[in-house]
């Protein structure tokens, strides 16, 4: 079929198998261009492995240190006449490239919050790898069915305490406008958001992996967070999502206790603001990212997801020295974003930005391009007017379902 982008708001409803393969290949080529990561991980589990930081982590582990990888995710395969999700196609392309390079790569498609998928993953580790030495926790989901209680929790994106009004942009039309978001109305919404996006499931994973004996001596685990500038605090860090991130970060000492006898460590890495399916849904953030891109590209310090993850692995997690942490015990690879000179320039542009000057002051074109790249579109090497085979199998998953 011929697959073109179909967009509804901040969601692209279609994805392109050849374009996503191109995107994966570009990320692999970048990691290979940086050379091998000395003392890198060798057997890696990535929970949330099909898009964004999780996919980039898997690519970095595999092609940066020849690691065997198992990826867990929840994606929809294609059916005749209906494209699969970008994450499905990403994984199919990744596994194909990994196999060609002689690297072990297998995947599990299902609800990573469930006990069933945890058990499947443990069984696969036992059968094929024995143990894993790195667990990346990179789940992004709007809802979670709790495996112990059966309660379905849905996250909300709201400020706490008072309403929030500021600028935002429709990145498709380029219209800059004010947006007002009402505060969360009850504590239950906050707790539901924490249940979905906090640290409990990460703790469940690590507890079950340890109990099953599949964690190697010196094991590391890392989850991802974001802080951002003060202008996004009301909707992000001081809002419902921020409460969940606080909970995620607060899980680190609990996991360090759990892993102590294995000489293992857990970390949260605070990453840079980037275009992801999740970030595009947050008011204010797309406009902030567009301005941030403009400033960081001008200074020659812009990074995408793969550059961020390669730097995290090579310069922090596996640098051979003590890992530098901030005052709250977090790894900071948002350090270039949060540089005083960068934030000063972004703040100055924020005060000037309008619909009329958007194209000149912000890198809205770069934002749009990165958004469409997520779904396999806007790659010069792909002819989007041609028929493409939409039904693509992931080699390690027998059923396309």
Image: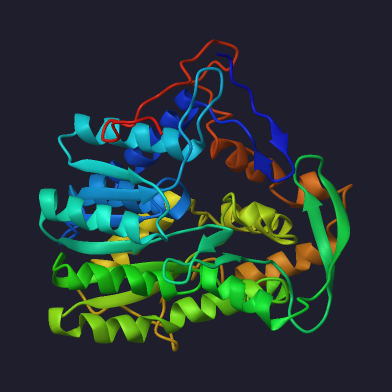
Find residue 29 and report its image quarter.
top left
User: Which quadrant: the C terminus?
Assistant: top left
Residue 368: x and y in percent read 66, 41
Find residue 94 and report its image quarter.
top left
Residue ranking furthest to the front? 150
Rendered view: 140 above or below 337: above
Q: Who's the residue at 70% across and 46% down the image?
A: 10
Counting the numbered discs, the total is 0
Residue ranking furthest to the top? 386
Q: Who's the residue at 59% across and 79% down the image?
A: 243
Rendered view: 390 above or below 222: above
Closer to the camera in the image, 171 or 103: 103
Q: Who's the residue at 69% across and 66% down the image?
A: 157
Judged left or right of residue 29, residue 270 is right
Residue 282: x and y in percent read 69, 59
Visible residue check, residue 320: no
Q: Who's the residue at 66% across and 78% down the image?
A: 188
Rendered view: 313 above or below 369: below
Judged left or right of residue 178, residue 1 is left
């Amino acid at each position: 079929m011929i697959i073109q982008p179909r967009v509804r708001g901040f969601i692209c409803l279609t994805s392109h198998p050849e374009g996503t393969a191109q995107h994966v290949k570009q990320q692999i080529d970048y990691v290979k261009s940086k050379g091998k990561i000395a003392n890198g991980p060798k057997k890696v589990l990535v929970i949330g492995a099909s898009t964004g930081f999780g996919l980039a982590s898997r690519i970095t582990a595999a092609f940066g240190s020849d690691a065997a990888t198992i990826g867990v995710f929840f994606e929809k395969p294609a059916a005749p006449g209906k494209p699969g999700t970008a994450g499905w196609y990403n994984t199919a392309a990744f596994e194909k490239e990994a196999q060609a390079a002689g690297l072990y790569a297998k995947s599990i498609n299902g609800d990573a919050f469930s006990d069933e998928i945890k058990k499947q993953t443990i069984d696969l580790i036992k059968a094929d790898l024995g143990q894993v030495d790195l667990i990346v926790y990179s789940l992004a989901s709007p809802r979670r069915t709790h495996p112990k209680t059966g309660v379905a929790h849905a996250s909300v994106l709201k400020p706490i305490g008072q309403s929030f009004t500021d600028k935002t942009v429709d990145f498709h039309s380029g219209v800059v406008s004010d947006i007002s978001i009402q505060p969360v109305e009850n504590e239950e919404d906050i707790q539901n958001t924490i249940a979905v996006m906090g640290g409990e499931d990460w703790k469940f994973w690590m507890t079950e992996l340890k109990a099953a004996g599949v964690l190697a001596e010196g094991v590391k685990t890392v989850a991802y967070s974001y802080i951002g500038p003060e202008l996004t605090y009301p909707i992000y860090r001081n809002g419902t999502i921020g409460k969940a991130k606080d909970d995620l970060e607060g899980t680190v000492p609990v996991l360090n206790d759990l892993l102590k006898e294995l000489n293992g460590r857990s970390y949260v890495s605070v990453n840079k603001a980037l275009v992801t399916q999740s970030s595009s849904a947050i008011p204010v953030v797309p406009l902030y990212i567009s301005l941030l891109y403009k400033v960081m590209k001008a200074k020659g310090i812009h990074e995408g997801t793969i550059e961020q993850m390669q730097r995290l692995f090579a310069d922090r997690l596996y640098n051979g020295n003590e890992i530098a942490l901030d005052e709250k015990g977090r790894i900071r690879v948002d350090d270039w974003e949060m540089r005083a000179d960068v934030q000063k320039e972004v703040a100055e542009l924020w005060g000037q930005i309008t619909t009329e000057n958007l194209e000149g002051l912000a890198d809205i074109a770069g934002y749009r391009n990165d958004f469409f790249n997520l779904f396999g579109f806007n790659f010069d090497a792909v002819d989007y007017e041609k028929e493409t085979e939409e039904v693509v199998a992931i080699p390690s998953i027998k059923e396309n379902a």
